[in-house]
Image (cartoon, grey):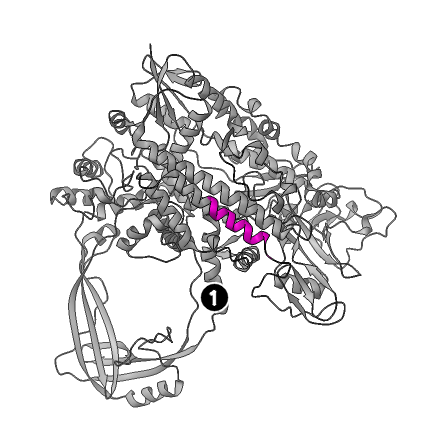
Amino acid sequence: MSKALIIAEKPSVATDIARALGGVPRQGDWFENDEYVISSAVGHLVEIAAPEQFEVKRGKWSFAHLPVIPPHFDIQPIAKNEERLKLLARLIRRKDVDLLINACDAGREGELIFRLIAQYAKARQPIKRLWLQSMTPAAIREAFAQLREDRQMLPLADAARCRSEADWLVGINGTRAMTAFNSRDGGFFLTTVGRVQTPTLTIVVEREEKIRRFVPRDYFEVHAQFAAQAGSYAGRWFDPEFRKKEDDPEARAERLWDRTRADAVVAACQGKTGTVTEESKPTTQQSPALFDLTSLQREANGRFGFSARTTLALAQALYERHKVLTYPRTDSRALPEDYLGTVVSTMEMLRGGQAGGGSADYAPFARQVLDRGWVKPNKRIFDNAKVSDHFAIIPTLQAPKSGGLSDAEQKIYDLVVRRFLAVFFPSAEFLVTTRITAVGEHRFRTDGRVLVNAGWLAIYGREGGRDDTLVPVAPDERVRAETVETVGLATRPPARYNEATLLSAMEGAGKLIEDDELREAMAEKGLGTPATRAAIIEGLIAENYLVREGKELIPTPKAFQLLTLLRGLQVNELTAPELTGEWEYKLAQMERGKLSRDVFMREIAEMTERIVERAKNFGTGTVPGDYATLSTPCPACGGVVKENYKRFACTKCDFSITKIAGSRLLAPEEADALLRDRTIGPLQGFRSKMGRPFAAILKLTADNKLEFDFGQSDAEAEGAEPIDFGGQNRLGDCPKCGAGVYEHGMAYVCEKSVGPEKTCDFRSGKIILQQEIEPAQMSKLLAEGRTDLLQGFVSQRTRRKFKAFLVRGADGKVGFEFEPRPAKPGAGGKAPGKAGGAKAGAAAEAGAAAADSGKPAARAAARKPAAKKPAAKKPAAKKPAAKKPAAKQPATKTAAKKPAARKPAAKRASAGK
């Protein structure tokens, strides 16, 4: 009997499909009945690669091997998922499988995942496409009744392949060319660039440059308090003759640049009476449009501080696991025109008209919408022209289970539901009053706004008549200026980007766009897509081009160095967001069948060649840029030390030090401190030739050469003098021998563990997995057995941040402990502090890192981090599995449970030997 093979993107989706199709029984690693075989990928299983003759090892990256533009792309399995790929290939090649159904995520990436699997397996069967908008059983069954033909999906498949291949060409060639340029004088300075990543970085760097160039200007305002019969009100002086000046963008009608003039206004008006004229007019405010992913990410970042990646993960969980939201990776903010019936049903669920639905928070508003017939055709909400492959994010017909959502998930769900309700409510109505008070020749403005009818704002807790109102002034009444004062202020620089404003700028290819209609018009020419923007921002942070400080995103010296290089080489293709926006537009056109794959890839190849040629043909001089002059004089001759592209060099003698040490860029302020103190650190962000991160102290030697110091001084060599800790604060008692623990180099050490006669081996690094351990935290660890919860650990394996406590074991070793997770209903109550899956892996590598940090072997480990491997292997039973994926997934059905075996290590991963 012939069967259709359904391939989903994730195992959980395959399970949902099996349930929706009547409970297709599990057969080991897949589901199967007489009609269907259902299995899944686990994300990407296959990746594109250049043919072998084009592949060059990183150590041989040079212009001689560039550009790399293969005539075609091969594909290769992703090692960690190879067993899953082999399983799908076996299922595809089964003789009884005569139809393939692509059930991967309904978008460009999902299409690519499936197409590469089918290509790898040399699939010959016809293909159909399952296009899911919602994960409820009814929605899955409805989508199966409307399977799309393969010919409809070929333009999307072409766009998916072109996006992947274009990113490969620009990323590989650009990164190798810039790395080769920066490594011309020796060493290896990895300099990553990307087709979308680098223009996004340009947006942030250009804003930071404006902030740095900004010079504040003092200005003055005149504020007055007026007394009327009914009470008092405030007013602000303004110039009624003011006109905007192109040559002075900071000028405003209410600003005076001269204090003398402001004081003259005060003197002329103080205690005087004036006349009042005012104008009131009604205005309305519509609710914002329904959410697409980017607008949801912006709202969640502004309200809750969630990163774009966090919001995407939460929305994906609400769609996939809880099935309470529609597909989140959408760029549409409208619904199909035939969706009115579904909207009514959703309102009934929110009102409580369906089993399990309803909520005291939403029911009254849903009831109003239904009772007053507000769900009706409206092009602002229902418009097929504004719906792409997916419509806006709205709640599904399925209500969340009581207590089933985490706090963060509930916040995202609440945002979506309230916005869904709000678009059907009438506009909010305001009465806006502008009052002008004339005192002699001077004018003062007072603005008032009264909410007359809350409309959609009622959903957010606003009520009519609650805003501040102006005290009334009778006709022909004269008011008195009781107090008039000059207020000194200063202009402010533009705000730094946060994730909300950067997402908006990415939508507009560098232009901040607040207007909804203009945002829609620019959407196809933005940087990236709603589904990829979060990953782009996180990638810039992972590559140390951006850092988060609170909500702000701040470019690092490495980012400025990259932009200096690209501008100096005139590689505008990577620094002009508008150009990259045009590429995104072309991909969107390809999805509609309006642009051929060959034309697009030919243009990308030509751009790649230009990027490489500009780097290759640049002369030997320094790259032009805006460079710093250090305040500390030259340590050799006392001359002035200036920065250039590669070095900090004296202008009088031949002293210079590199700006790039261990693949890390030294900032001008760090170089100043190094010259002043002859040492700086420990600093993070160094990388070995193998690409492994490490921390170290930098110091100037007696002959003014720059070298690493890993905290192991000559005083620890055999026969050296004992180390005197007399001038230091004792942090606590050694947990192994009771002697004193002190700061020493890059570690906290027992006084008996250093010097010529060592009788103890206790030491713990000052930096563990990029988390700085402050002396106060080490004291707390020694005294109480545990630090506070530390937020800044970064996994070397995943590059993700995690939180943990440092804890002291009974044997004196320092390890990790994670904060307990609240048990979910029916979860069986996990032990507090234990972690499974990825967190267990993080704990294992964290334990190894804590064990290694600041040890005597650290000198070799930091200079040659490959030597750290033996220490790291102990907790990481995962590593062999990563090299031999077959050992990791012998049986796919148990793969999801396997990390549980590492749970005990997660609670207290060993961190000291």
Question: Left of 759 or right of it: where is 583?
Answer: left
* Image: 121 above or below 863: above
- Could you say where residue 34 lies in the image, as x and y percent from the top left? 32, 12
Residue at the spot x=49%, y=33% of the render? 73
Task: Specify the quadrant that holds the N terminus.
Answer: top left
**Quadrant of the image occupied by residue 35:** top left
Q: Nearer the viewer, residue 221 or 244?
A: 244
Q: Nearer the viewer, residue 796 or 821?
A: 796
- Amino acid carrying label 1: it is Ile
Residue at the spot x=16%, y=44% of the render? 369
Q: Main secondary structure of the magenta part?
A: helix
Task: Specify the quadrant that holds the C terminus.
Answer: top right
| Residue density around tag 1, few if under 14, some if 14–19, many if 20 or more, within 10 Å | some
- Could you say where residue 326 lies in the image, as x and y percent from the top left? 30, 37
Q: Nearer the viewer, residue 706 or 255?
A: 706
Badge 1 marks a residue whose secondary structure is helix
- The answer to whether residue 615 is magenta is yes
Residue 802 in view? no
Residue at the spot x=66%, y=65% of the render? 672
* Count of all numbered marks drawn on residues in the image: 1
- Could you say where residue 687 lies in the image, as x and y percent from the top left? 64, 46
Q: Nearer the viewer, residue 258 or 726?
A: 258
What residue would you read off at disc 1? Answer: 211
**Quadrant of the image occupied by residue 846:** top right
- Could you say where residue 40 lies in the image, as x and y percent from the top left? 41, 25
Start-end of magenta stretch? 605-618
- The answer to whether residue 573 is magenta is no
